[in-house]
Image (spheres, rainbow, N blue to C red):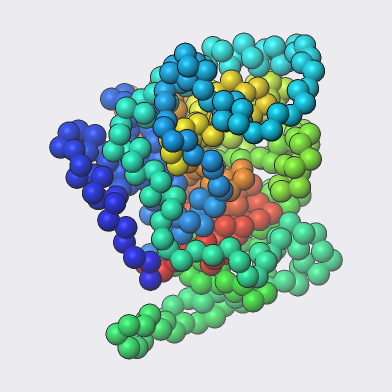
């Protein structure tokens, strides 16, 4: 069992001001609001995910498995610009590399740069608001370096994308153990749980844990953890319409989509298979939405071509309206940005575009059940594995139309969340037991 790290609470008790109270709340919730209007929020994805689990919790060391070079002192963006320091300055001590010849930007790149310069003051203000909260900054290294016994060595993880394309894929089965009771052993050992095993097809099949306990599952000698009231459907894009409910009043109120956007990067293609962007036009978003309306959240890269595609084709095809844009700003454990703010092809932020489907009638309600999201909110966090997005549902629920609790689904999911349905060709990607520790 992992030992508790006292430095978190020590930091929370370090000051007797409002930020100290906010930090204590953050240690429980994973959410730290950096301004009074709640337009800038720092989140710890691990704490947010752990709200889903009963007997297990996500390993911080497993989630934050990326390594970052830290600085001896973190400065505001303004200080860096004045003194000429930053990631470029850090690289000056290294062997000089031959500089590539600069080229002129094309029309789309010019548009992207103009958009970035317009956005820059917002991101500067959000980032500098983080740097003013010293006790939160002092906690960040402990969030990542938590001693929990996580190890990435040993057996290889299964590649569900490859397995799903094999001719024997329809014959693969997963075993789920639904707990029936607990047998206590010696004082220093874990309690032994006895249960009933259920074996079901893994691919092209809706699999759910409708209990209030975590469920352990086994597939090809690997174990997976399923949070309470979660379900998943593992398939490729050809079977996505299997998710459409027979009756639209059984649809979803919150639809989060993290598409594998096509990308020219050879590295990205190697670690995360992509699809042509036009394939996403055929996602049945409107058919998945509840008749009372749905909030649609789309994760997006900073490419101008992609932004135009979403604005001009994708959202109109899906029937998404009332669109606002928000930003995920990525920082290192020392509080510095993961890359220079103005680095053209590697910005330290991504966009999430938010809109609504089937909400025309809600505009005329005397007491609407939700509030529309304000534009340009900024969410700050330390990133996890490649392309793994922070779970922001807790911050979105007040803006979700329809019934409560909301019915939620994530498309192209790579992990499960309690109370949600997850669809994609690898929704168990981060459910491997190696990413968890017992509570």
Residue 264, quarter of the rendered image: top right
Residue 79, quarter of the rendered image: top left
Residue 104, quarter of the rendered image: top right
Q: Quadrant of the N terminus?
A: bottom left
The residue under the point 44% across, 36% down is: 72
Q: Is residue 126 visible?
A: no
**Percent x, y for residue 322?**
51, 22
Left or right for 98, reference 295: right
**Residue lying farthest to the right in this orientation:** 167
Count of number-bearing discs? 0
Q: Nearer the viewer, residue 250 or 89?
A: 89
**Percent x, y for residue 14?**
20, 42
**Percent x, y for residue 320?**
58, 27
Left or right for 95, reference 128: right
Asked if 231 appears above or below 168 in the picture, the reply is above
Asked if 148 appears above or below 102 in the picture, the reply is below
Asked if 365 appears above or below 62 in the picture, the reply is above
Q: Nearer the viewer, residue 131 or 362?
A: 131
The residue under the point 38% across, 54% down is: 51
**Residue lying farthest to the left in this orientation:** 16
């Amino acid at each position: 069992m992992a030992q508790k790290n006292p430095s978190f609470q020590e930091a929370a008790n370090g000051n007797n001001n409002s930020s100290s109270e906010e930090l204590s709340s953050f240690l429980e919730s994973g959410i730290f609001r950096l301004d009074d209007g709640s337009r800038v929020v720092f989140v710890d994805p691990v704490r947010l995910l752990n709200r889903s689990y009963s007997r297990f919790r996500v390993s911080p060391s497993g989630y934050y498995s990326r390594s970052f070079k830290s600085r001896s002192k973190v400065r505001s963006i303004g200080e860096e610009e004045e003194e000429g320091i930053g990631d470029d300055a850090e690289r000056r001590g290294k062997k000089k590399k031959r500089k590539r010849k600069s080229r002129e930007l094309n029309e789309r790149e010019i548009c992207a740069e103009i958009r970035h310069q317009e956005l820059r003051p917002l991101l500067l203000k959000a980032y500098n608001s983080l740097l003013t909260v010293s006790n939160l900054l002092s906690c960040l290294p402990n969030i990542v370096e938590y001693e929990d016994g996580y190890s990435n060595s040993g057996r290889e993880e299964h590649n569900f994308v490859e397995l799903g394309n094999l001719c024997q894929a329809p014959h693969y089965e997963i075993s789920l153990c639904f707990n029936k009771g607990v047998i206590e052993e010696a004082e220093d050992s874990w309690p032994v749980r006895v249960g009933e095993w259920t074996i079901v097809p893994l691919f092209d099949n809706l699999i759910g844990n409708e209990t209030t306990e975590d469920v352990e599952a086994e597939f090809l000698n690997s174990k997976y953890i399923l949070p309470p009231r979660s379900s998943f459907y593992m398939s490729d894009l050809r079977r996505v319409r299997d998710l459409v409910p027979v009756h639209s009043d059984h649809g979803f109120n919150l639809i989060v989509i993290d598409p594998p956007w096509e990308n020219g990067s050879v590295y990205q293609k190697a670690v995360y298979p992509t699809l042509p962007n036009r394939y996403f036009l055929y996602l049945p978003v409107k058919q998945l939405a509840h008749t009372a309306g749905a909030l649609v959240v789309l994760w997006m890269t900073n490419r101008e071509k992609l932004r135009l595609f979403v604005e001009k084709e994708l959202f109109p095809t899906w029937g998404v309206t009332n669109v606002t844009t928000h930003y995920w700003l990525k920082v290192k454990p020392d509080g510095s940005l993961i890359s220079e703010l103005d680095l053209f092809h590697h910005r330290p932020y991504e966009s999430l575009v938010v809109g609504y489907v089937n909400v025309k009638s809600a505009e005329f309600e005397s007491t609407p059940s939700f509030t529309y999201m304000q534009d340009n909110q900024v969410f700050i966090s330390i990133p996890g594995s490649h392309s793994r997005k922070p779970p922001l549902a807790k911050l979105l629920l007040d803006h979700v139309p329809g019934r409560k609790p909301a019915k939620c689904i994530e498309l192209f999911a790579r992990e499960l969340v309690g109370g949600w349905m997850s669809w994609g060709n690898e929704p168990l990607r981060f459910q491997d037991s190696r990413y968890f520790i017992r509570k």
